[in-house]
Image: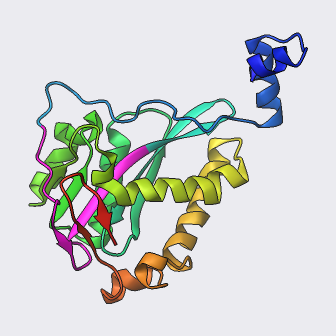
């Protein structure tokens, strides 16, 4: 943006452009902070879902972290999703990338919905930590992790982030954490209970999760592509 304005004849530097963009509530949509940094001493588990038919709720859950830009920095959003129904089982916001908010999110999902057969995540240090994997192991949940650099292994969460950002975050332009928290609370209720999904036969995630009718998926090739 600075380069464009200078070429248009405006005498501005990067700092002024940043300040003006903040005042106007403008932000780039390029990727932000890396939320999936591996820890060299943490155990990595194999990816178990290639070629697996997803045929019932609580067969596979998965999780991921994304960043959300606010006028004065970033916050991080973690969510747990049921693959069969696409239902959001739990979510948390944090202003740091620590492990605690991910563990809290996992424990809430288990407390509310029981346990899945398989839990899938990327290789980020939050999900490979002893605190996080310990909860899975203690509940006899099989652990699966994406291959390195293969976002499609966790395609349902990747699609969720795109939906949340375009339908809530980018439209509402929340300026505080409290505003974002309230907005996401309302949005996830809408997402689970009211928003029809074409891939679910135009049913809601809540309905599919309750009835076990209309969901499902199959991972069909060696590259992690997904057919729904």
Principal SS element in the magenta part? loop
x and y percentages locating residue 188 in the rendered image:
53, 65
Which residue is found at the position 64% from the left and 47% from the top?
178
Is 228 located above or below residue 201 in the figure? above
**Number of numbered discs present?**
0
Asked if residue 194 is among those painted magenta in the image, a careful observer would answer: no
Foreground pick, 44 / 52: 52
**Left or right, residue 30 beside residue 56:** right
Foreground pick, 160 / 126: 160
Is 19 located above or below residue 112 in the figure? above
**Left or right, residue 14 beside residue 195:** right
**Left or right, residue 177 beside residue 119:** right
Residue 120, by quadrant, is: bottom left
Which residue is found at the position 34% from the left and 35% from the top?
36
Which residue is found at the position 10% from the left and 55% from the top?
138
Q: Coloured how?
A: rainbow
Residue 127, by quadrant, is: top left
x and y percentages locating residue 52 in the rendered image:
16, 68
Residue 182 visible, this angle: no
Query: Which quarter of the rendering shows the C terminus?
Result: bottom left
Query: Which quarter of the rendering shows the N terminus?
Result: top right
**Magenta-highlighted residues:** 44-65
Which residue is found at the position 90% from the left and 15% from the top?
10
Residue 127 visible, this angle: yes
Is 62 located above or below residue 64 in the figure? below
x and y percentages locating residue 81 in the rendered image:
36, 63
Residue 190, by quadrant, is: bottom right
Foreground pick, 160 / 179: 160
x and y percentages locating residue 47 in the rendered image:
15, 51
**Left or right, residue 158 beside residue 164:** left
């Amino acid at each position: 943006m600075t380069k464009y304005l200078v070429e248009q004849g405006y005498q501005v530097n990067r700092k002024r452009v940043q300040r003006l963009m903040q005042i106007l509530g403008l932000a780039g949509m390029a990727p932000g902070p890396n939320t999936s940094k591996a820890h060299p001493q943490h155990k990595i588990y194999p990816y178990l879902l290639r070629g697996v038919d997803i045929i019932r709720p609580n067969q596979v859950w998965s999780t991921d972290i994304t960043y959300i830009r606010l006028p004065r920095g970033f916050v991080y959003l973690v969510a747990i999703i049921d693959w069969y129904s696409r239902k959001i089982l739990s979510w948390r916001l944090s202003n740091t990338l620590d492990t605690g908010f991910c563990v809290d999110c996992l424990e809430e999902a288990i407390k509310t919905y029981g346990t899945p057969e398989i839990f899938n995540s990327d290789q980020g240090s939050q999900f490979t930590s002893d605190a996080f994997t310990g909860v899975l192991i203690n509940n006899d949940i099989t652990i699966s992790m994406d291959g390195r650099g293969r976002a499609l292994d966790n395609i349902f969460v990747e699609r969720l982030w795109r939906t949340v950002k375009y339908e809530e975050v980018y439209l509402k332009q929340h300026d505080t954490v409290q505003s974002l928290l309230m907005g996401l609370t309302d949005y996830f209720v809408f997402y689970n209970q009211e928003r029809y999904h074409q891939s679910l036969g135009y049913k809601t995630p809540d309905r599919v999760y309750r009835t076990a009718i209309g969901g499902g998926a199959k991972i069909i090739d060696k590259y992690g592509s997904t057919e729904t």
